[in-house]
């Protein structure tokens, strides 16, 4: 049985390192020596993989990155298959434009994790920074597919300009959650911050806890029994998340908006069974 390809960080770099080349689809067919000779961008200079990491194992379809600090950025960027496991925290842009496979971060991620993600699974065992599942600065489309699971809390503007896919948060979400959301699903077990759904056009936000405030540009549509929630929660039952342990609520309060943006998005508040 082949052993995973393990990258063990030798030291903490002073500048941030672009680790996007360290994905299964880019490493396939390369020997350990060839992998060690790859160049990574570190600030304004190039850094050899073998200089920053000690390498072991040989299975490039199962990559393990043992991190120290938060200087390693773009881990799993544009990956199309295989798996990447991060032992520790990582920097910004984890899972950037990811299209397939699985990334499992056994720690926290920086800003813009799952930015413009298209497919696959991103698991975060601790917290995620701002702009989770959002668009790159200057872009108009954010996450457009795949699943993000966060066991901790997330920062501000989670799902900003989100187009498709699902983000499941077991902790709390910061301000402007689902801002400018175009479609997709965000579910939050904990609390959410101010300006929930700002300029939202479509999509669904599922909340187990009553938010501190509902924006005045959202309209209360009353209590509903929504059959699609049963199918949605059934699909979550196989996920490695606390969401898999819950049944769909029998009834939810449906709040629609952002009406100031001619939006048809919805905030669904659980009312119990």
Image (cartoon, helix red, strand yellow):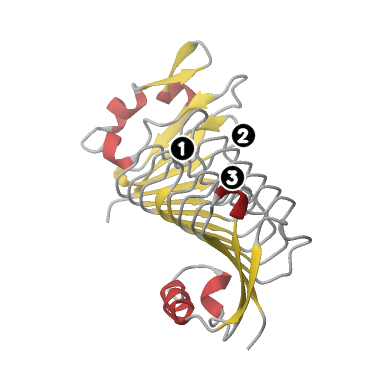
Q: Quadrant of the C terminus?
A: bottom right
Q: Which residue in the structure is indicated by mark 2?
A: 70
Q: Secondary structure at mark 1?
A: loop
Q: Secondary structure at mark 3?
A: loop
* Residue 12 placement (x, y as % from top left): 61, 27
Describe residue 148's horizontal placement relative to residue 256 as left or right. Answer: left
Which callout, 1 or 3, points to the residue nearer the camera?
A: 1
Q: Which residue in the structure is indicated by mark 1?
A: 75
Q: 117 or 220, which lies in front? A: 220
* Residue 80 placement (x, y as % from top left): 30, 45
Q: Badge 1 local density, few (<14 within 10 Å), some, or many (20+)?
A: many
- Answer with mark 3 or mark 2, whichever residue precedes in sequence: 2
Q: Which residue in the structure is indicated by mark 3?
A: 88
Q: Do the numbered discs 2 and 1 sit on residues whose CB atoms are within 8 Å?
A: no
Figure check: 107 above or below 171? above
* Residue 247 placement (x, y as % from top left): 54, 83
Q: CA distance from mark 2 to mark 1?
A: 11 Å
At 49% across and 59% down in the image, what residue appears? 203
Residue 180 visible in the snapshot = yes
Q: Do the numbered discs 1 and 3 sit on residues whose CB atoms are within 8 Å?
A: no
Q: CA distance from mark 1 to mark 3?
A: 12 Å
Q: CA distance from mark 3 to mark 2?
A: 9 Å
Residue 186 visible in the snapshot = no
Q: Secondary structure at mark 2?
A: loop
Q: Which quadrant of the figure has residue 246?
A: bottom right
* Residue 197 placement (x, y as % from top left): 62, 53
Which callout, 3 or 2, points to the residue nearer the camera?
A: 2
At 65% across and 57% down in the image, what residue appears? 152
- Answer with mark 2 or mark 1, whichever residue precedes in sequence: 2
Q: Which quadrant of the figure has residue 49?
A: top left
Q: Residue furthest bottom?
A: 273
- Answer with mark 1 or mark 3, whichever residue precedes in sequence: 1
């Amino acid at each position: 049985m082949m052993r995973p390809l393990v990258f063990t960080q030798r030291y903490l770099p002073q500048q941030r390192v672009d680790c996007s080349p360290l994905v299964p689809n880019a490493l396939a067919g390369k020997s350990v020596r060839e992998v060690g000779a790859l160049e990574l961008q570190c600030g304004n200079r190039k850094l050899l993989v073998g200089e920053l990491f000690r390498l072991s194992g040989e299975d490039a379809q199962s990559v393990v990155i043992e991190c120290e600090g938060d200087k390693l950025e773009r881990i799993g960027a544009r990956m199309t298959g295989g798996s990447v496991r991060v032992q520790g925290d990582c920097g910004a842009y984890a899972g950037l434009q990811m299209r397939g496979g699985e990334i499992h971060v056994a720690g926290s991620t920086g800003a813009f994790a799952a930015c413009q993600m298209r497919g696959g699974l991103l698991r975060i065992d601790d917290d995620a920074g701002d702009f989770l599942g959002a668009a790159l600065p200057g872009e108009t489309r954010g996450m457009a597919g795949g699943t993000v699971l966060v066991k901790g809390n997330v920062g501000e503007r989670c799902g900003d300009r989100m187009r498709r896919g699902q983000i499941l948060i077991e902790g709390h979400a910061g301000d402007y959650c689902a801002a400018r959301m175009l479609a997709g699903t965000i579910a939050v077990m904990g609390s959410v911050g101010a300006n929930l759904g700002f300029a939202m056009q479509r999509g669904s936000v599922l909340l187990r806890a009553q938010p501190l405030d509902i924006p005045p540009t959202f309209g209360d549509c009353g209590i509903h029994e929504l059959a699609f929630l049963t199918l949605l929660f059934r699909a979550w039952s196989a996920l490695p998340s606390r969401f898999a342990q819950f049944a769909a609520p029998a009834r939810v309060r449906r709040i629609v908006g952002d009406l100031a943006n001619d939006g048809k998005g919805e905030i669904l508040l659980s009312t119990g069974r």
